[in-house]
Amino acid sequence: MADQSTPQARTPQARTPDVPEERAAAPAARHGISRRRLLGTAGATGLVFGAAGGAVGYASAPAGASTPLASVGERQVPFHVKHQPGITEGLQARGHLIAFDLVPGAGRKEAAVLLRRWSDTARRLMAGEPAAHGDTDVARDAGPSSLTLTFGFGHSFFARTGLEKQRPAALDPLPDFSSDHLDKARSNGDLWVQIGADDALVAFHALRAVQKDAGSAARVRWQMNGFNRSPGATAHPMTARNLMGQVDGTRNPKPADSDFEKRIFVPENGEPAWMANGSYAVVRRIRMLLDDWEKLSLKEQESVIGRRKSDGAPLSGGTETSEMDLEKTDAQGNLVVPINAHARITRPDQNGGAAMLRRPFSYHDGIDADGVPDAGLLFICWQADPLRGFVPVQRKLDRGDALTPFIRHEASGLFAVPGGAAEGEYVGQRLLEG
């Protein structure tokens, strides 16, 4: 919760039984319409309700009279890009995080077949097209809706595939932190997939496709579901709020920053070579102890964070983007921004310049046996090196963050996310076929 490639030829491979047999893509005519176009409004399609209140039929829409998608539905993110999609795009309204372990006996060959299949599925779905095999029709009427799929490798993947020599030093396991209460069953994993979209059904459709594509090559280790505010829900674009009601993400690095690429992505000539243009994702399931948090007064909440709740401005004054004055005091000589305020501790200039791009989702998984909400933040941060990004900031938070009594880190993962796939490539091809 911090405040803030050379194309390679796609080589044919022998079919293996470890993933479902691929079938030819269904023609667009199978659906009658493309996912990228709506049938039209309810009036135009002639939706009829019977006496029981159920939909009983559709009248044919006039030829060529389909209505364009709303702006949210028509937004498309390209798959073949320098950096994998789902990193620098804005927050999406719905997300799924899912980790897989390769099954016993599956290795490098099976992983390559799986990543090739996943990449093809991602390319199709992100373009608003049906999956090539066994499409469920869940997102039949929707457009791309800013769908992104992002793929990464965990520390254990390299031993399972005999690729230990290619494992990056930056992927060494994260150290233990005093605020950790980690469930190992919901942490780490051989493979990690991040799915985001601005429509819940589009995101779920992608989730099911990824799960089905895994076939008998990999099994689900854990899955987490998240959400953010929907696009257009506010009068003007603004920084998102978390479930504590705080504006969250004000000091995020921006692509326009001169050092953005250096801080977030592995350089073209970086090590290992297969990680060129890639990044490292730290994933933390952070439970918010909302019942305790909501007992605090507004002033107490603002002192914990170091920012005004209303607009995210620092307690030292100004607007959300104003520089925080860490030395400002009140009439009694007390620091306006408390020494243990979360926003003070996490500032990059207070952590040797450590920076990470935060791209989280909120989550709510119901009420536990004690009647307490199981809700909080699926914290995802991106950096060129976690030892210079996430780790130093989290260590400092461990030493005295005022927010610590109101949160609990319950799951954790670190994943190496290679650069984007060029045309004709699949994600991770340089690692798996290098």
Image (tube, helix red, strand yellow):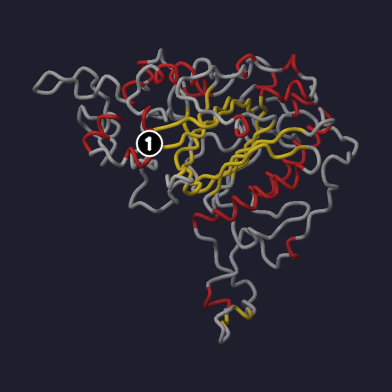
SS class of the residue under badge 1?
loop
* Image position, residue 290 (x, y; %): 37, 41
User: Which residue reaches farthest bottom?
Assistant: 51
* Image position, residue 208 (x, y; %): 68, 50
> Badge 1: how crowded within 10 Å, few (<14), some, or many (20+)?
many
- Quadrant placement of the N terminus: top left
Q: Quadrant of residue 27?
A: bottom right
Q: In this view, does 245 lie to the left or right of 265?
A: left
- Quadrant placement of the C terminus: top right
| Label total for image | 1
Q: Which residue: 29% across, 36% down?
A: 312
Q: In which quarter of the image is residue 254?
A: top left
Q: Which of 229 and 190 is in front in this view?
A: 190
* Image position, residue 216 (x, y; %): 81, 41
User: Which residue reaches farthest left?
Assistant: 331
Q: Which residue: 70% across, 45% down?
A: 210
Circle 1: residue type? Asp
Q: In this view, does 35 lie to the left or right of 364?
A: right
Q: Is residue 131 left or right of residue 223?
A: right
Q: Which residue: 64% across, 22% down?
A: 276
Classify 191 as above or below 126.
Answer: above
Q: Where does label 1 land, which residue?
A: 248
Q: Which of 252 and 78 is in front in this view?
A: 252
Q: Nearer the viewer, residue 276 or 179?
A: 179
Q: Is residue 433 left or right of residue 81?
A: right
* Image position, residue 154 (x, y; %): 66, 26
User: Which residue reaches farthest front?
Assistant: 370
Q: Which residue: 69% across, 36% down?
A: 100
